[in-house]
Image: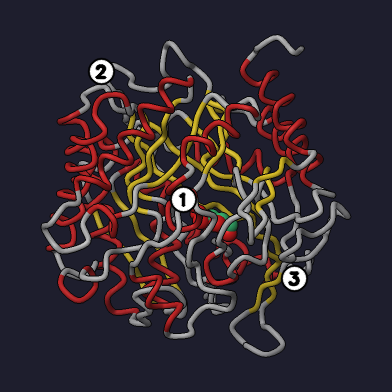
Amino acid sequence: MSLSTVIYAEFTSSALATQAQPSTHTPEMPRFPFPDRPKLWGTAVSHYQVEGDDVCDWTRWEEAGRTRGEPCGQAVGTWDRYESDAGLALDAGANAFRFSVSWSRVEPREGHFDDIALERYRRLVDHLIAIGLEPCVTLFHYTHPLWFHGRTPWSSTASVERFRRFAARVAEALGAAVRFWLPLNEPLVFLLAGWFDGQIPPGITDAGTLRRVFDHLLAAHVAAAAAIRECVPHAAIGIAHNMMAFAPERRASFLDTLLAGAAHRCYNRSLIEAFATGRWDFILPPATRIRGRRDDLPRSLDVFGVNFYSRLHLRCPGTKRFIGEFAYRDATGAGLTDNGWEIVPEAFPALLEEAASAGFPLVVTENGLADANDRLRSRFLETHVEAMARANVPVHGYFHWSLLDNYEWLDGFGPKFGLYAVDRMTLLRTPRPSVETFRRLGEAFLGRSVD
Ligand code: BGC
């Protein structure tokens, strides 16, 4: 999700400069990378963005006119096409497939689980295994069942148990065939957008609850990880963390530089430190200190996933907001994506190195761009994969966002992130030329022979 949907130009310069302790994470038996498949090359989708006809909190958000584009509706119909869509990933040279499970489909009423929905995901997993794609399952990708916010919102401790129970049911249903699990996608983005500036459901703007909500999200991760490992002892548990590069708009400006540093510490480092040390302590603007501790957090993780898209340029004071402003800019001449994001592979290695400082094996869980005419996607792929190789840390997997053009949250169906274009009327999928680049890069990454 775009940071512009999330932030809030009011970064303070008072963020704490906490330093991560070197990780003490020493799993007895590493669960990741998988010995028989040490590298993953895949595509990523999320349930709401592709499946269609899923009634959840986001549907209500659309009905309330809180999104800019068309409502999601049938999305791109993947619910009925998962197997053929997985085939498209395979055709593009993938050996892994990241998708998410819809909580609202699986538990439409609190405590009532829909076995047919679980069975549908089970069939997908069986199919992925049969065609040789490693399933990577995300459990939380922004949406909630309709009952959730009213009964057990993330500010209540009951939320943790609800999520654990959902995770346990999914793990039971999908079984040991799924080795790679991501309980949460971008918990910090969700915290900021859902509970701080209220742009996404549940649409709350209450700095007073952030500390509790963040703690519950991390507790939910830990509880889900334990529930998954109970069913699938060899499971590799990951987190997908959105990382953004931040730069001072004016290099010589002390305040711009301070602001960029503060943004980096709060947006990028906080979650890395939390998983590395079990403690977090950061400041959200204007002066909300979020700190907490969960000693079991480092042990709950086996893989650190990075979602990387772009860079923001920060200025303080801003022209409209004294406290600061941010913008995307084409600072290097690589061009802007269709939705105006800077393409900046040069920032990627340092962010990967920073993520690796948590002490877990790394995977890129998302990276991609909106580019309807496919003018920039091949070069984007090449330069990001090169940048990944330049990082001073091993990267064990790469998932491209996205396999298909899909529903892009607040922006509806405008931005086209797909390796495959989707016709909105016929739902016909057509490979964009950059599929060939993705395939070629995948061959090299996986060390397969190139035809
Ligand atoms: C989110 C996706 C979203 C993508 C592009 C990621 O941060 O996980 O759901 O489509 O950004 O905005």
Horizontal side, residue 119 vs residue 43: left or right: left
Q: Secondary structure at mark 2?
A: loop
Q: Nearer the viewer, mark 2 or mark 3?
A: 2
Q: Position of residue 158 (x, y in %)?
A: 12, 63
Horizontal side, residue 401 vs residue 146: left or right: right
Q: Nearer the viewer, mark 3 or mark 1?
A: 1
Q: Name the mark on residue 341.
A: none
Q: Position of residue 196 (x, y in %)?
A: 40, 76
Q: Position of residue 61 (x, y in %)?
A: 41, 78
Question: Mark 1 to mark 2: distance in Å?
Answer: 32 Å
Which residue position is annotated with label 2?
Answer: 28
Which residue corresponds to the image point at 34% horizontal and 71% vertical from the top-left?
Answer: 57
Q: Are marks 2 and 3 in contact (CB under 8 Å)?
A: no
Give the mark nearer the N terminus: 2 vs 3: 2
Which residue position is annotated with label 3?
Answer: 253
Type of amino acid at the residue the image marks with label 1? Ser
Q: Position of residue 229 (x, y in %)?
A: 20, 31
- Asked whether the viewer can see residue 323, the reply is yes
Horizontal side, residue 144 vs residue 241: left or right: left
Q: Secondary structure at mark 3?
A: loop
Q: Which quadrant does the N terminus fall into?
A: bottom right
Give the mark nearer the N terminus: 1 vs 2: 2
Which residue corresponds to the image point at 43% horizontal and 46% vertical from the top-left?
Answer: 272
Q: Note whether 177 is above or below 424 in the view shown.
A: above
Which residue corresponds to the image point at 67% horizontal and 56% vertical from the top-left?
Answer: 423
